[in-house]
Amino acid sequence: MEQFTFFILMLDATARVSVPLILASMAGLFAERSGVVDISLEGKMLGAAFAAASVAWLTGSAWMGLGAGIVASVLLALLHGWASITHNGNQVVSGVAINILVAGLTVVLGISFFRQGGRTPQLAREERFLPLEWPGAQALADVPILGQLYSELLSGHNILVYIAFLIVPLTWWVVYRTRFGLRLRAVGENPEAVDTAGISVAAMRYRAMVLAGVLCGIAGTYLSTAQSAAFIKDMSAGKGFIALAALIFGKWRPKTTLLACLLFGFLEAASARLQGAFNVENASGAMAEFLKGLPFLIDALPFILVVLLLAGFVGTAVAPKASGIPYVKER
Amino acid sequence: MSSATTRDVPRWVSVVLLPIVNLVAAFLVSGLVILAIGENPLRALAILVNGAFGYQEGIGFTLYFTTNFIYTGLAVAIAFHCGLFNIGGEGQATLGGLGVGLVLLWFDFLPFILILPLAIAAAVVFGGFWGFIPGYLQAKRGSHTVITTIMFNFIAATLMVYLLSQVLIKPGQMSPETREFLPHTWLPFMHEMAAWFGLSLARSPWNASFLIALLAGGFMWVFVWYTRWGYEIRTVGANQAAAVYGGISPSRNIILAMAISGAFAGMLGLNEIMGVNHRILLNFSAGYGFVGIAVSLMGRNHPVGIVLAALLFGALFQGGADLAFEMPKITREMVVVIQGLVILFAGALEYLFWPYLAALFRQKEPVAAPAAAE
């Protein structure tokens, strides 16, 4: 029983830390499936987190914050599109530029607006996305297994968590079951063919940029108004890159990418729990060294796994064929 | 896009004028940001320039930052020559610093004259190794260096936290750092070296690694343009199929270019660890690896351009620190904003102004040529 409760709590923690990864990796999925490499997921999330926390504090409404987060992130996505679609710029360089620009701009503007060393003011309860209690969760909490599953795992998350988990099947449906999705995939694999069919490659890619912007906007809003109660300097802390890693690990497919996000989220949750959980004094020699190193190994595991995958040691990852290549129409 | 090709336009327009125009655009947008937060951009520029070049100590700091950017700029450039994108400068610099630090910790019974080559070798080998693996994976397994080098940055950061918090930490202290190295193993500061010749320079972190950086730039220049290896690397970068046709192995050159790239980035450890901090500590790479991308782009992947661009960014870093001190509304992060804008305009939007410049400077075709064409 004890173990089951622990298991549930771990899953609960996993769900919570996976949310920004899931949203950002779905954003990356739209961008990269359309043929635009997007390493600016990190910057878009960070920008959205700042905009959301600022506007939520100014207006007193978490939903206005969400709107601002999405607008900020979409604008950054359009900047990425303008550089890499309209001007055929190097997509990686554009992504790096956006990440660095946002890392600086959020702090400069934050200090200028709020004078709290780059933080935004602490948000009050009603300015945040709060956990939603499902009906009967209190009453069922004591029922073994099913009751615990319901009250701990399903109930008690904020609305953005549920949105994130619903986004995945929605993404799957859009990418594989709609005309838009078919064209999106085609434009990432063979833009010449799409162009020949009379569909604008640039317009398709811009639409993908906007979708990526919206999803990163929700992810950033989650960071600053749901998980925390303020924007903190560099609060995305590499999550955009872990999301990118999950996207690659999931081979650019929604379902497998979700699993990769959950795996990486679980590793993060586990590492946080393991830190200091072992009694190193009781172990000796090599075992003690191993236990001391274990949390760090777990921290690095997502990145190591992606490298192993890309190297073809655990399956293969084949990127959309045209991703990273600007499409220049021949005249 | 207009039909202007590089051929119709004088070379200096694309080599000199275009980067300057891009830089001006980046500065104009930065000026707008400064205006938006309620400060005077022209006064900010004056403070920045004075902070970077106006007094001896400031110049020393500028050149100390410049040193880092020369290393990381060269690292990005050599990979670019092979058609590769190395955004792993952070991780390679971290490893290079670790190598330098270990030499200074473990071999401090040796005299300086032996420690110096050992430390340089350690920086090259450790940093180079961290570039070699992504290079090998790209060449032999087709893993894209953009992604693998990002991942290696994170792996290096985690490795360093582990080593410094669990293994190398000086016993009995809280902060994750090693003990200080023995003073005779440090690289001499420039003001110390000036004193040997009876000159007096203000104290600053500017140290002998600056000279090593200039030598590294010279090495890169000779290597890329005057050796067979450099020729092969450039050929692979320009056209892999042609390289194969000419009997040049792309995979060998990809690995070589990435290893050298990592080695350049790793040498940042000479400046930060051996020259200034005198101990191994966390986060000493402080984003210098990423700035290397901007430096390389601005410098057009040429050592001379890179040294000049590194000086520009060094001045930005030092002047920006003064700016934050003088103008309370502006913080150090303003420099990060300018950096981002420079990468955006000089890199991603490189050809934004090109059609206009090309139209402006297009040379009149020789009168006979069109007639001959018809």
Image: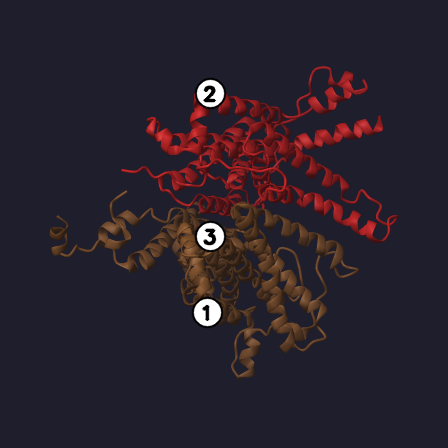
User: Which of the two labelled residues, at mark 1 and mark 3, occupies the earlier sequence position?
Assistant: 1
Q: Secondary structure at mark 3?
A: helix
Question: Is B374 placed left or right of A325 in the picture?
Answer: left
**Subunit ID for the residue under disc 3:** B
Q: Residue at x 66, y 45 (%)?
A: A300
Q: Is residue B180 above or below residue B245?
A: below
- Determine if marks 1 and 3 fall on one subunit: yes
Q: Classify mark 1: helix, strand or loop.
A: helix
Q: Give the Cα separation between the discs numbered 1 and 3.
A: 26 Å
Chain the render paints red: A
Which quadrant of the view contains residue A312?
A: top right
Could you say which quadrant of the image residue A315 lies in? top right
The location of residue A218, given as percent across then percent down, is 54, 30
Tell me the brown chain: B
Q: Amino acid at mark 2?
A: Thr
Callouts 1 and 2 in the same chain: no
Q: Which residue is mark 2?
A: A178
What amino acid is at disc 1? Gly
Residue A235 seen in render? no
Q: Nearer the viewer, mark 3 or mark 2?
A: 2
| Mark 3 residue crowding within 10 angstroms, few (<14) / some (14–19) / many (20+) | many
Q: Would you name the residue on which mark 1 appears?
A: B218
Q: Badge 3 is on which residue? A: B339
Q: Amino acid at mark 3?
A: Gln
B138 horizontally vs A276: left or right: left
Assess disc 2: are there few (<14), some (14-19) or many (≥20) residues with their C-alpha within 10 Å of its C-alpha. few
Where residue B333 sits in the image (x, y, percent)?
52, 51
Name the residue nearer the viewer: A124 or A316: A316
Q: Measure the alpha-carbon separation of dots 3 and 2.
A: 41 Å
Indicate the chain on which mark 2 is placed.
A
User: Residue A134: percent from the left, percent from the top?
Assistant: 69, 18
Contact between marks 1 and 3 (CB within 8 A): the answer is no
